[in-house]
Amino acid sequence: MNHTASSASITRAYIGSPESNFSKLFIPKLLELGPCMLVFILQKPYVLSPKNSSFLLKQVLNIKQWNFYSIAGIWYWYFYSQWHKVPMQTFHSVNDPKLINLLKDKEFILSAGLNEKVLPPILNACPNGIVNFHYSLLPNFRGRFPIFWQFVQNDLNFGYSFHKMGTNLDNGTIVLQKKITISKKAFLAKNPIASISDELSLHASNQIHALIYAKSFQKVPNESAHLYTSKEFSDFHRIYLSNSGEKWSKTCQFSELLILEDRYIIHVKESDASSIQKSQLRMIGKSILITKDCRNFIIRKINYLPAAFFYFQLKHIANTR
């Protein structure tokens, strides 16, 4: 779907996902400063999944990857762009060669929330480069899911960076960087990582004016800082019945969606049920209570079905450990 309004006189562009919170917050702020071309990438969201999933689970995960919110988002932005009389384009990849002609005359390009690395042909086509938004005080927590890793490491120095994209991820020159104090409400939320993300995004959206007219830049001081990957994220969420209850307890602090034995996705939460000294499994309605080192965990769903369907498979795994 392409909105064909003229882009000849427009010198700014935004690249992002149609359903992301970045787009909802950043685009209106950009348009307050003048017309801006909207470029949306129809990317698949990252979905936590086991290595050896069943055929049925693979189909469910494929449906989850094709985010229906993306379709609704495209229609929303189509009418939004019509109302504001700005051009809009959609692509399935940020590295589509057709993007080169669209971006080569733009003086300022902002990207946010892309799951795909931008390759040199696109980067080289932009005379002033592409400014990217990142959820950390670079060079710390480069790569994927920075707020998650910062939360895991109990690092309370939260902030964000706008930086120039380069051939190495999150290593470009910093255009604007802010450290902010996260509210107590965000830390106590049911999903603190999402709440912290929302506060950072909202704060960053109010810096768009300063970002566009920024005059001083700084080089990222340590290009050897660790680059977190999707594999590390998946590995953290893998749990085994042979692990201790301490391992389960730590993992459940950060996510209720885990990978069990590389075959099952389980939805789990720590339970305050009365402790049982011996490790065991037992049924509680449609859920399964698992006891590890006197800690109790409720498994509510496995592979998006009630956990009771998988009781005997789980019991078999436990008995072979």
Image: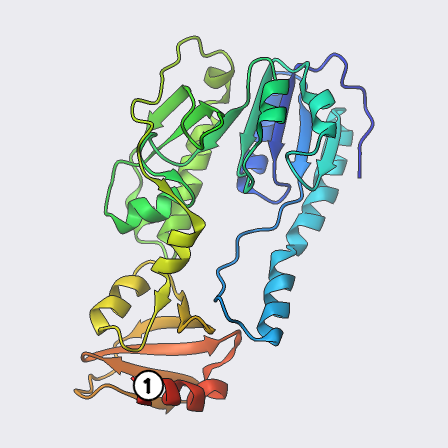
Q: Residue at x 50, y 71 (%)?
A: 52
Tell me residue 30's x, y (percent): 59, 23
Quadrant placement of the C terminus: bottom left
Image quarter of residue 57: bottom right
Question: How many callouts does the rendering have?
Answer: 1
Q: Residue at x 68, y 31 (%)?
A: 39
Q: Is residue 227 visible?
A: yes
Q: Is residue 250 left or right of residue 305?
A: left
Q: Residue at x 51, y 15 (%)?
A: 212
Residue ranking furthest to the left: 277
Image quarter of residue 144: top left
Q: Is residue 286 visible?
A: no
Per the image, the residue denoted by label 1 is 318
Quadrant placement of the N terminus: top right
Tell me residue 159's x, y (percent): 34, 33
Q: Is residue 116 above or below residue 321?
A: above
